[in-house]
Amino acid sequence: MIGDNLFFEEIEKVSKIVKALIREKNVKVISHHDADGLSSAAILIKALTREGVNFKFRILKQLTENDIKELDIGESDFLILLDLGSGQINGLKDVLDKTQVLVLDHHDPVRKEHMNLLHINPLVLGEEEISASMICYLFAKMLNIRNTDLIDLAIVGAMGDIMDEKWELKGLGRKILEEAEMLGKISIERGIRLYGRNTRPIFKSLEYSSDAVIPGITGSESNAVQFLAELGIELKEGERWRMLKDLTLEEQKKLASAIIVERLKNGHEDAEDIFGEIYNLIGRPKDLQDAREFATLLNACGRTGNFGVAVRLCLNDLTALRDSWGILENYRKMISTGLNWLRDGNFEARNSITIVKGGKKIPDTIIGTLLSIALSSGIVDSTKIVIGFADDEDGNLKISARMSRNLNLNLRDIIVEAAHSVGGEAGGHKFAAGALIAAGKEDEFIKATENKLSNQVK
Ligand code: C5P
């Protein structure tokens, strides 16, 4: 065991209860559609299969009150909620009155008890936040020690939810990483914080360098190409585009120095702060070895509704790889179309917030991802909260909100209060939150957010 505290004691206790209960019940697993939720689902699917339990699983965008009603849970069922549920405990009352519910989640929790509620959330138990996939891993390991082989998925989910700081896992997450290293499932490398090491041409990695921003080059393909040409780094090897991992050590050093020089020239405060950790998954196919890229692929699958492909990838069904590349390509196109639309100035910079009205132009499943990239790559002002709206398929308004970690606010509290004031549902984390409200309530919601912010600043 990693630690010895209330959190771990609770996981152990709950895993024993669950083990005793689930064989008698129809188990229904519900998880969230992002990389953390999908890796959580895969961990539980494998663990339940090993227990010989019959179960059904579903992936949802959110767990709304309507979804809960439609679940149709009876006394013979056992409901397991992954990467969602902690914020919806009130809405689960009717279900809890009938049967047991296990929640493995890390969203800001509603602190309510019920004799049928088995609630594992580090924030409820005085522990620091880790990803849902890590919680699921700890739970699965207590259920059966064989499940330690699922530890790499715990790391993938954590990458998906950006649980690391500047590409380094800290705290309890780091302990799980060290366990993965010890088990021979992960190796740790240091490198430049550029996405797409194994999957993108180098100039694309530079163009999309939102973590270690390179002034003038981030966001510009032609400047990225020119930058590499000036450094004498070949773009191609024969017919094949070269990727970051193909660079010789010499070239990598040259590239790193040049990036630092560019940042220094532009008066960047932490010009040399461009390195971080790369987590390699040992024993996975080449294309899925980088935990961050694996998470991107899962996000692409989840946010385009291809849940089966995502879970198959996690469970090492290699036939899913073939299906996944087209999905990723499509997803990248969606993101890049959305970013270009934002670059064209389709947002409104107000005093304390930036508003993006995506309407039908931006799919509700990617508005959050778009805002995260827009914020980190400087398309929108990173000193303000950014709030995006998109129409969902049921005629409601999906809201995503993001802010930089430098702001000393709690975005979840702000969004939850504003959403409740217009009769909507909301939840999330300190730096990333979301909501669902009725169409036409946009301006009322914005006003409520601004009021709350001005009260806080006073
Ligand atoms: O959808 P988006 O990526 O913007 O969501 C940000 C965070 O807010 C996620 O962790 C999501 O689970 C949470 N959220 C929520 N309730 C909603 C919408 C989002 O808890 N109605």
Image (spheres, rainbow, N blue to C red):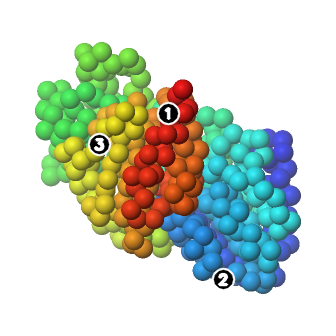
Marks 2/1: CA distance?
Answer: 43 Å
**Along the polypeptide, which appears first: circle 2 or circle 1?**
2
Q: Is residue 144 left or right of residue 225?
A: right
Given residues 200 and 362, the one toward you in this image is 362
- The reply to whether dot 1 and dot 3 touch (C-beta < 8 Å) is no
**Along the polypeptide, which appears first: circle 1 or circle 3?**
3
Which image quarter holds the C terminus?
top right
Q: Amino acid at mark 1?
A: Ser
Q: State whether residue 147 appears in this view.
A: no
Tell me, for residue 12, which label it has, or none: none
Tell me, for residue 348, which label it has, or none: 3
Given residues 246 and 64, the one toward you in this image is 64
As helix, strand or loop, the secondary structure at mark 3 comes to strand
Q: Position of residue 398 (x, y in %)?
A: 43, 60
In the image, what residue occupies the spot 51% across and 57% down?
Answer: 422
Q: State whether residue 358 appears in this view.
A: yes
Closer mark to the observer between disc 2 and disc 1: 1
Residue 112 in the image: above or below residue 30? above
Closer mark to the observer between disc 3 and disc 2: 3
Q: Position of residue 40 (x, y in %)?
A: 60, 60
Q: Which residue is the site of mark 1?
A: 454
**Does the Cβ of the disc 1 residue fall within 8 Å of ligand 1?**
no
**Does the Cβ of the disc 2 residue fall within 8 Å of ligand 1?**
no
Tell me, for residue 72, which label it has, or none: 2
Classed neighbour count for the residue bearing mark 3: other residues with Cα under 10 Å, few (<14), some (14–19), many (≥20): few
Q: Amino acid at mark 3?
A: Glu
